[in-house]
Amino acid sequence: MTSNPTPAAIVGPESLAPLVVLVDDVRIFRDGRPALLAQTADAAIDLLESLQDRRIDELWLDYDLFNATVEPLVTHMVDRANAGDPVDVATVIVHSSRTLESVQMIRRLRSAGYTMTRSYAADIWARNPATVCARSRE
């Protein structure tokens, strides 16, 4: 049996100012900051599309997502930028421990015009209890 993660969920207080989107399958912010959470690339694409023209202040990206990667989201964002309609995001923050893949994501998104940064902070994360429960049922 495979896990069917929630497409997107609000983590933390529902007031989303600033608007933070976290794309990660197992982590949430330890400090409880509000964020919209997507656990798969497809859920993240759907979430970004549902936000339409709302400005995203921070888009946090992990590379490995369950049994897949964030690559479809990166391709979607690059394709939109190349078509002249980039996702309206102030800063994309890559927080993956996969060094090579992180560098490649940063290069692709930066060359498409996105403002990129890399986060090495390990102490800002907590394990998402919903993910632990879902995986224990597999």
Image: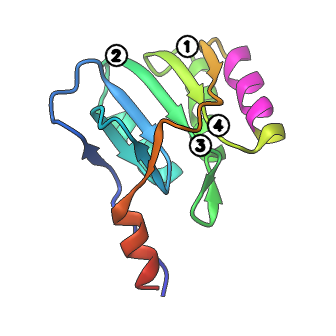
Q: Is residue 107 magenta?
A: yes
Badge 3, how many Cα within 10 Å: few under 14, some, many 20+?
A: many
Q: Amino acid at mark 1?
A: Gly
Q: Which residues are magenta?
A: 102-111
- State which tag comes first along the sequence, 3 or 2: 2
Q: Which mark, residue 84?
A: 1
Q: Amino acid at mark 2?
A: Arg
Q: What residue is shown at x 44% (from left), y 44% (from top)?
A: 44
Q: Which mark, residue 75?
A: 4
4 or 2: mark nearer the eye: 2
- State which tag comes first along the sequence, 3 or 4: 3
Percent of width and height locating residue 60: 50, 32
Q: CA distance from mark 1 to mark 3?
A: 25 Å
Q: CA distance from mark 3 to mark 2?
A: 20 Å
Disc 3 target residue = 62
Residue 76's place in the image compared with 1, above or below, is above
Q: Is residue 104 magenta?
A: yes
Disc 2 target residue = 55
